[in-house]
Amino acid sequence: MPGQKQEYYDSQRRTLRPATFQRLHQNQWVSSENRFIDEQTYDACVEPGRPELSGSLFIGVDAAIRKDNLAVVAVKYDDHTDRLVLADVKIWKPLPGQQINLESSVEFYLRQIYNQPRAHIEKILVDPYQMARSVQTLQAAGLPVEEYNQTQNNLTEATEALYSVLSTQGIRLYNAPDLRRHVLMPLALKRPVGFD
C-alpha cells in the first residue's frame, strides 16, 4: 500500500502466520490449511546448550497410551529476561500392539522432577481423559497437578500461545530433534476464532 514502510511489512511478516501475511499484504489466495510452524520459525528459537532442569517449572502433559505419543514438556522463565526456556522434554512412543504404562513412564518421570532439590514444580497441566488415575495418584503424592481438558477453547488458546511465543522468539529452545519433528508435523486449519 502507498505510504507503508518496509519496517511495517517486516513487523507484520514476523508476527503473522505466513498464509495470513500473503493474504493481507500480498493479495494472494491462500488455503485455510497450512503448516502450523515452519522450520525457520522453530529453528530461530534454538540456542546452543541445554538448561538445567531447575528453578520454577511449569509442565504440560499430553497423554496417549496406544497409537499416539505421550509427551511431557517443562518450561521455566529465564532468570534475566521475560523469555520462556524449554527446560526439558520427554516423549514416549508406544511399541506396535502395546500400550504405554503411565505409572512407569510419566508418573515416574514427574516424581523424579518433583524430588530434585533444585527444581520446584509450580504447576502440571494434564488432560484427564487418559490420565484420571494418574492425576489422583500424583495429587495424593503432593504434586501440583491440575486438569486441563482438551476442549476446543483450550486447544485454540494453547495453539495461539505456542505460535505467538515461537514466532516472536519468546522462548529459548535447546536442540531436541524429537520435539522439533513433532512441532513441525502438524497442519493448522484457520477458523474464525483461531487455529485447529
Image (cartoon, rainbow, N blue to C red):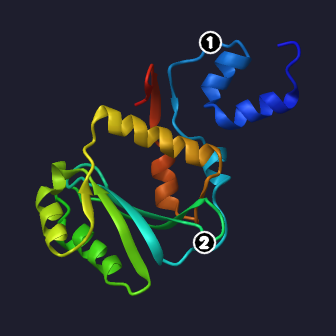
Q: Residue at x 17, y 59 (%)?
A: 99
Q: Where in the figure is residue 171, as x and y percent of width and height? A: 59, 56
> Which mark is drawn over residue 79?
2
Q: Residue at x 66, y 65 (%)?
A: 47
Placement of 78 over or under 11, stated as above or below: below
134 left or right, relative to 121: left
Q: Amino acid at mark 2?
A: Asp
Q: Where in the figure is residue 50, as x and y percent of width and height? A: 57, 74
- Element carrying mark 2: loop
Which quadrant would residue 22 be assigned to in this image? Answer: top right
> Which mark is drawn over residue 29?
1
Placement of 42 over or under 135, stated as above or below: above
Which of the two marks, 2 or 1, is nearer to us in this view? 2
Would you say residue 92 is visible in this rendering? no
Placement of 160 over or under 101, stated as above or below: above
Q: Where in the figure is residue 7, as x and y percent of width and height? A: 84, 33
